[in-house]
Image: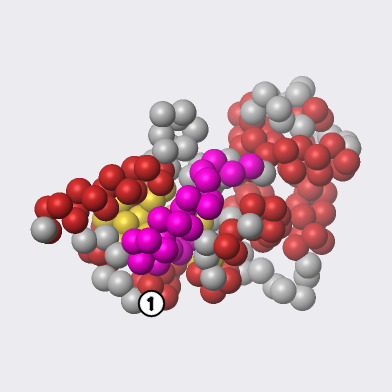
């Protein structure tokens, strides 16, 4: 029986911000003349640089964000309109699920929840504050790559172990939710039950699906 949830952020709770800013139709205007494969490479490179390095809290996330965009602009040889960058970042931060319903589900089902994601400090802080994730997760239930200095799919499974230690629930009773095949496979190898979910598909409703899974398990155990 499922007793705990481990949830990804990008593509599950909210859009992947760097992909929105670099690759979507609404991408930053300075990137319009840059080949898409170049944007893909630079976006992934600097996401990894900031997401998989432990955040030194002596440097504010706001300053890290400025450094990030300076590096990106220099490598792409473009001039960025910082006001546009700020606005498009804010526009990208939207909730893909109804957090109130997720909170209600967690309470009524006595389900503990952890958010486990590869994130940069600055985009995580922007999303957490704007989307009020603290209403669903305690502050110590955010297992982010920039805390551990590695990806959640790293072979050492440090982030997975941290989730288990926090939840105090065996992997076999924990559902891992992500939109990336590689992460799902790593989670299964670790022993989690795993669900690949894609919030961008209109017919998908995560809370509805979780409720159906819960009812199904209760019926099979009854």
Q: Image quadrant of residue 87? A: top right
Percent x, y of residue 2: 27, 60
Q: Image quadrant of residue 74? A: top right
Q: Is residue 82 left or right of residue 44?
A: right
Percent x, y of residue 121: 67, 61
Coloring applied to the structure:
secondary structure
Q: Which quadrant: the N terminus?
A: bottom left
Residue in the image at 61% along x and 37% along y: 19
In this view, the residue in front, 89 or 46, is: 89
Residue 161 seen in render: no
Q: Which quadrant: the C terminus?
A: bottom left
The residue tagged 1 is 165
Q: Residues within 10 Å of mark 1 (few under 14, many from 20)?
A: few
| Helix, strand or loop under label 1 | helix
Q: Image quadrant of residue 173? A: bottom left
Does residue 167 belong to the magenta stretch? no
Percent x, y of residue 94: 64, 42
Residue 55 seen in render: yes
Does residue 110 belong to the magenta stretch? yes
In this view, the residue in front, 103 or 114, is: 103
With respect to residue 67, does 137 lie above or below? below
Q: Is residue 102 left or right of residue 70?
A: left
Q: Is residue 181 left or right of residue 43?
A: left
Residue in the image at 69% along x and 58% along y: 129
Query: Total label count?
Result: 1
State the extent of the magenta-drawn residues as a range: 94-116
Percent x, y of residue 55: 66, 69
With respect to residue 165, does 45 lie above or below? above
Residue in the image at 53% along x and 52% along y: 100
């Amino acid at each position: 029986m499922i007793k705990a949830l481990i949830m990804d952020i990008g593509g599950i709770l909210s859009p992947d911000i760097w992909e929105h800013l670099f690759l979507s139709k609404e991408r930053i205007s300075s990137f319009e003349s840059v080949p898409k494969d170049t944007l893909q490479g630079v976006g992934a490179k600097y996401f990894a640089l900031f997401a998989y390095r432990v955040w030194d809290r002596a440097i504010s996330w706001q300053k890290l964000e400025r450094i990030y965009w300076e590096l990106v602009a220099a490598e792409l040889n473009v001039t960025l309109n910082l006001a546009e960058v700020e606005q498009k970042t804010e526009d990208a931060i939207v909730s893909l699920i109804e957090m109130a319903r997720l909170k209600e589900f967690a309470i009524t089902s006595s389900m503990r929840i952890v958010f486990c994601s590869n994130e940069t400090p600055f985009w995580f802080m922007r999303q957490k504050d704007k989307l009020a994730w603290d209403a669903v997760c305690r502050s110590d239930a955010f297992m982010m790559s920039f805390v551990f200095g590695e990806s959640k799919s790293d072979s050492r499974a440090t982030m997975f172990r941290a989730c288990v230690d926090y939840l105090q629930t065996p992997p076999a009773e924990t559902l891992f939710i992500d939109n990336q095949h590689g992460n799902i496979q790593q989670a299964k190898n670790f022993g989690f039950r795993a669900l690949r979910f894609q919030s961008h598909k209109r017919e998908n409703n995560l809370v509805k699906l979780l409720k159906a899974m819960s009812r199904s398990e209760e019926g099979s155990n009854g």
